[in-house]
Amino acid sequence: MDTIGNLIDKLTIINIRIWMAEDVKRGKGATDKQIADATRLTNICNSQRNDLIQEIDEAINALVSSGSVQKLYSQ
């Protein structure tokens, strides 16, 4: 099982992929194929993003429900 931090890292990567695909779609010289490929990627990433958000919500709810204390790291 991933930690909340790992899930947030994955969510960040997915968001970057979405932003990059959106840049391709908005590019002045983008071909129809590039736009179609970027749109497909955006759709896939949005689905993954929704799944990750759901996992994060469930992980936080589990922590709150169990009352367990999270390990804190200090530098």
Image: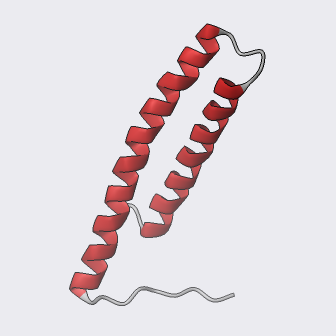
- For the view shown, which residue lies furthest in the left direction? 65
Which quadrant is home to the C terminus?
bottom right
Q: Position of residue 22 (x, y in %)?
A: 62, 33
Question: Which quadrant of the view contains residue 67?
Answer: bottom left
Q: Is residue 41 left or right of residue 63?
A: right
In this rendering, the answer to whether 16 lies above or below 38 is below
Q: Position of residue 46 (x, y in %)?
A: 44, 40
Name the residue at 22% across, 85% down: 66
Colour scheme shown: secondary structure
Question: Which quadrant of the view contains residue 68?
Answer: bottom left
Residue 1 appears in the picture as rendered: no
Q: Is residue 26 left or right of residue 48?
A: right
Residue 30 appears in the picture as rendered: yes
Name the residue at 51% across, 32% down: 42
Q: Position of residue 25 (x, y in %)?
A: 64, 25
In this rendering, the answer to whether 52 lies above or below 65 is above
* Foreground pick, 48 / 73: 48
Q: Position of residue 38 (x, y in %)?
A: 57, 24
Question: Which quadrant of the view contains residue 3?
Answer: bottom left
Which quadrant is home to the N terminus?
bottom left
